Amino acid sequence: MTEPVVSPSASALSAEALNALLFRAEAVLSRLEGLLPKPLSAPDWSASVAFRYRRRQGLAVLEPVKHVAGIRLSDLKEIDGQRDRLLRNTAQFVAGSPANNVLLTGARGTGKSSLIKACLNEFAAQGLRLIEVDKAELTDLPDIAELVADRPERFIIFCDDLSFEEGEAGYKALKSMLDGTVAASSDNVLIYATSNRRHLLPEKMKDNLGASYTDDGELHPGEAVEEKISLSERFGLWISFYPFSQDEYLAIVAQWLRHLGVAPADIEAARPEALIFALERGSRSGRVAGQFARDWAGRRALAQGAAA
């Protein structure tokens, strides 16, 4: 039987086609690798005491915060009870003693997030670090916790202004992270969250339809209500904040004005304007007090400069 004859030109053509195919395959694989999620890499931990977790073009990164808010515990007024509770819990955590995840809830602008930042500045020299995570990225909490598990520092994962709508993925992820996963959380990570909602999920009238009553008149919440309560219950420490009275508001205004270098006599003269400012805003919060102080001090400095 005669063997088939393959011409040299045909062999060369086959080799060229194979090389072209391999080149195209490598190009496709390179593009696919760019689309695949990449593991979270460690930042330069010495670059800052605070970090932000972000996703940029599908890549997860921990970005050092270049300018950390310099607020101190002594700057915060009229929240002494809340300050003492969070300070005690944070001190336990930094010392390596048992401590709780914390949910700070209540009126807007009353110092919830400022208190957490002040605790960071209080204990940063002792190894405390903060990682800010947006609600949209909470599904990545296990990756963050795994990255820092073997670090010598103590990490607070900070979730600001936290609330959820029905069905959001971050709700389940946070719930599992707090208490419920098969893997034990490392002892150098705590979660501090702030929210205007005590139960973090919207509470609707229809949720009460599942409630039941016993023969002796006891009320048992339905499953929908129980589910909405279950997340906040996993925080070991609840700290509540309340709207400020007029005197408390004016005390915070005075603190802000002193911080901005305003003389005591001028601080007293600014009180009536501070009350009008709060009335116009419909709020006597610490945030409004700070906004008024910056506005008043700025206007006064500008007027004094023009008169000079």
Image: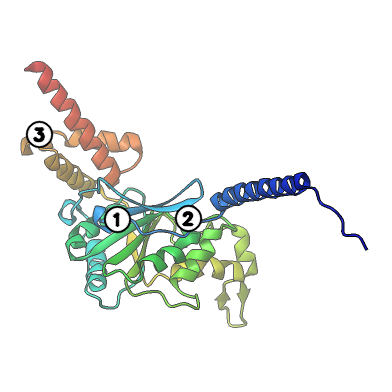
Residue 302, placed above or below residue 276: above
Q: Are marks 2 and 3 in contact (CB under 8 Å)?
A: no
Q: Which residue is mark 1?
A: 44
Along the line of sight, the residue nearer the viewer: 71 or 253? 71
| Element carrying mark 3 | helix
| Element carrying mark 2 | helix
Total tally of numbered discs in the picture: 3
Amino acid marked by disc 3: Asp
Along the line of sight, the residue nearer the viewer: 16 or 282? 16
Residue sitting at the far right: 1
Residue 264, placed above or below residue 219: above
Label 2 vs 3, first from the N-terminus: 2
Amino acid marked by disc 2: Glu
Q: Position of residue 69 (x, y in %)?
A: 24, 48
Disc 2 crowd rating (10 Å Cα; few below 14, some 14-19, many 20+) is some
Say which quarter of the image contains residue 272: top left
Q: Position of residue 127 (x, y in %)?
A: 22, 65
Label 2 vs 1, first from the N-terminus: 1
Q: Which residue is mark 2?
A: 137
| Element carrying mark 1 | loop
Q: Which residue is mark 3?
A: 266
CA–CA distance in space, label 2 to label 3: 46 Å
